[in-house]
Image (spheres, rainbow, N blue to C red):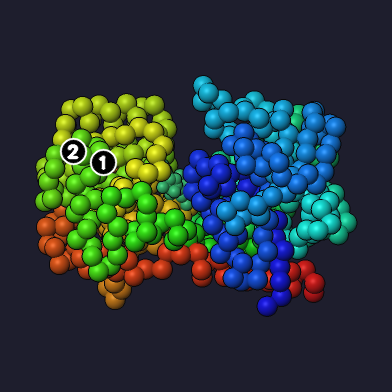
Amino acid sequence: MTPVRVLAVASEVYPIVKTGGLADVAGALPIALKAHGVEMRTLMPGYPDVMRWFSGAEEIRRWPDYFGGPGRLLAGSHDGLDLFVLDVPHLYARPGNPYVTREGTDWPDNGVRFAALSRVAADIGHGLVPAFVPDVVHAHDWQAGLAPAYLHYDGGARPGTVMTIHNMAYQGKFAPELIGSIGLPWHSFNTSELEYFGGISFLKAGLQFADRITTVSPTYAQEIQSDEGGMGLGGLLRARADALSGILNGIDTAVWNPQTDPHIAYRFGADDLTFRAANKAVLQQQFNLDSSDEAPLLGVISRLSWQKGLDLLLEVIPTILREGMQLALLGSGDRDLQEGYQAAARANPGRIGVVIGYDEILAHLIQAGSDALLVPSRFEPCGLTQLCALRYGAVPIVSRVGGLEDTIVDIGEAGREATGFKFGPVTADALGWALHKASTTFRNKAACRRLQLSGLATDVSWRNRAGEYAALYRDLMASRRR
Ligand code: ADP
Ligand code: GLC
């Protein structure tokens, strides 16, 4: 096995900084790649939560003026992850969410903040750190999208580049004037390079110039080549179809392990699924739901955004009530959805329980105690909560899109062991019908147990999926040598 060195570039990495699944992937993939002979280091910005761990880390480089203020590049390790941290206080020393202000609007200088990250990624690609000269630079999402572009415009020898799309909805769009201030050439401003509807897009830049493009499921790789799924970049992705592939995400099976999980009330494995009932009772208490072993309990752990289809779930609350089910929802995001769910909980005490916020411990308890986990997304590049659900014996009820289509086997599918329920099109009617079907199945204990056991037997780990990334890096290196 030829050893491969990869510089990953990510704006969030679990367990240090997380707003969504990107962090989970950036935190787990490097560790899983070790078994495949890939040495990955991850470059991330030095937000306050990062500097708490890394302020004393080894200083590799210091700049008196890096994009308008002093900056340093640090190297260190945390929990088995090898990191480079770009410590530039005037860009990253801001509390809270990495992308938005306390009022919820994007930081006005996000273009410069993430150009700075990509610039240093390209420099590491060129050999800035002699002890770690990567064979491949792997950029995640728009925040890292300029890394392949800088490497392209710099000219000369360069490492191979991979761009991974975790979500087409976030494209890093900025005014064209930014070009001059981030050290890109003005001739890049045309529609076959960085120009995007009169401005520039960092995601487009990455998709244009990366040697390989991946996204996080095979079905999403198809969907984003359509005009609708591509959200403006479908044409470019069709043109680059030969470079594009889908590799499913895994989950960190050490963090998500019902046999050792410190966050759940009662630990369990495939042989003692009956302990789930005890977790269900705790979950019902925490969400102020009536204590009932019989009522099927639906769980949701999600960002509250249009993508996730949770407005449709609000519409089918009458079905949930009619079927004698309960709902425990944990999430935060759009104000309208937050208020909608809070109102539903007030109107249906004991039946609908809602916690608005981000809470890792509750997320584990929902997986361990709910009978079903709902993911009714309009689009879903991969989705991770349904993978955790498979491992915890919560039966997934999901829409037929993206990675949900690829990771769940519907109860009606012939010839394969079913693991859950899938519905489509993504409408309230189809969701309501799926809930009705699930409710009927849940009253049949043997059928329900079969679904749970085939879920528990599904491989949701990173082991094989990391192997697909390792093969991609090696293939890319071989093709560049030819
Ligand atoms: P996305 O990245 O689109 O938000 P994913 O399903 O890929 O969706 O990943 C979401 C991750 O964030 C999962 O690890 C999930 O458990 C976690 N998560 C989402 N919302 C919450 C919340 N309110 N509290 C705790 N964890 C959450
Ligand atoms: C994105 C997607 C989600 C995916 C995650 C990690 O946030 O919305 O489907 O699982 O990235 O790849």
Of the numbered discs in the image, which one, if any, rests on residue 145? Answer: none
* Image x and y of residue 33, in percent: 60, 65
Which kind of residue does numbered mark 1 sit on?
Ala
User: SS of the residue at dot 2?
Assistant: loop
Can residue 442 be seen by looking at this rendering?
A: yes
* Residue on which disc 1 sits: 328
Q: Residues within 10 Å of mark 2 (few under 14, many from 20)?
A: many
Mark 2 Cβ inside 8 Å of ligand 1 = no
**Which secondary structure, mark 1?**
strand
Q: Residue furthest top?
A: 103
**Badge 1 or badge 2: first in the primary sequence:** 2
* Of 212 and 197, the residue lying toward us: 212
Label 2 near label 1: C-beta < 8 Å?
yes
Q: Residues within 10 Å of mark 1 (few under 14, many from 20)?
A: many
| Residue name at image x 49 percent, y 48 percent | 21
- Residue 151 in view: no
Q: How many marks?
A: 2
Residue found at x 58% / y 28%: 95
Q: Which residue is mark 2?
A: 289
